[in-house]
Amino acid sequence: MSVIRLYHPEKIEDHTTSLLNKEHAHYLVNVMRVKRGHNVNFFNKEGEWVSEIVFLEKDRVEVKFLNKLKLELPKKNLELAICLVKKNAMENILQKATELGVENIIPIISDRTEVKEINLDRANKIVIEATEQSNQLIPPKIREPIKFKNFIESLNDKKLLFADIESKAYLNKKNVNQEDKIVLLIGPEGDFSPSERQLISKLSNRISFSISNNILRSDTAVITAISMINFILNQH
């Protein structure tokens, strides 16, 4: 059986025991069908620990934390600002953005956004599961949806990387470095309105770039753009 990794937001200390919540207990007993003595890894922002199951019944599982395997990793200063899209595409975006290592996800309501809200409970469950699967420690924080104008006003000193369907320029090492606080902006289906584009064009700390000669779906655009940024950052 492959290593089971579960997110445990509470503080973990070596050689202490913990009674798992019902969701984790159900998953271990009924889905993974583990037995007493099995090892399970738990992680949070402080690191990752291996544990041993010391008590197991149908709806009750207790583990003992043995030792720390990983320390907290340096955070990536990369946020994703994404105009809300329909449920299936949005869930794919949440999953893939998490796997690719974004720190925060900012849902945006723009002039041409058809979807105006997001189920944050469901969204947080998706990013936690993606963090477990992708061997990371800290799930990205998902903010409350924000109107586009308010998002622009909140940027402060952050560098905005705008995936612009009208741009002919490409990202390079001169545009992005490890010290930057980066916000990647992906627009809605149908692009931003003229007034929104005007707000973007006035930003001094903005870089517009092309990710494809083709028109991409929002979820494809997210994967492509983040992969480009990660490639450049990993070259430094």
Image (cartoon, rainbow, N blue to C red):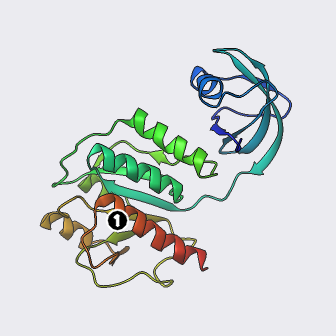
Question: Quadrant where the N terminus lies?
Answer: top right
Q: Which residue is mark 1?
A: 221
In which quarter of the view is residue 32 placed?
Answer: top right
Q: Is residue 161 left or right of residue 168?
A: right
User: Where is 166 relative to 222, above or below?
Assistant: below
> Camera-side residue: 10 or 24?
24
Q: What residue sits 53% from the left and 42% below the top? A: 129
> Could you say where residue 226 lies in the image, as x and y percent from the top left?
45, 66
Estimate the x, y position of residue 167 in percent, counting from the top left.
27, 80
- Which corner quadrant of the image does residue 191 belong to? bottom left
In the image, 210 versus 55, the foreground residue is: 55
Who's the residue at 71% across and 28% down the image?
34
Asked if residue 75 is positioned above or below residue 205 in the image, the reply reads above
Local secondary structure at mark 1: helix
Image coordinates of residue 161 in percent, x first then y, are 38, 70
The crowd level at tag 1 (other Cα within 10 Å; few <14, some 14-19, many 20+) is some
Please indicate, yes or no, whether residue 177 appears anywhere in the rendered image: no
Q: Nearer the viewer, residue 185 or 61?
A: 61
- Above or below residue 75? Residue 145 is above
As drawn, is 70 to the left or to the right of 137?
A: right
Residue at 71% across / 43% down in the picture? Answer: 3
> Where does residue 89 sit, x and y in percent of width and height?
32, 50
Residue 51 visible in the current orientation? yes
Amino acid, disc 1: Ala
Q: Quadrant of residue 123?
A: top left
Q: Residue furthest left?
A: 194
State the residue at coordinates (20%, 68%): 197
Q: Nearer the viewer, residue 204 or 229?
A: 229
- The quarter in which the C terminus is drawn is bottom right
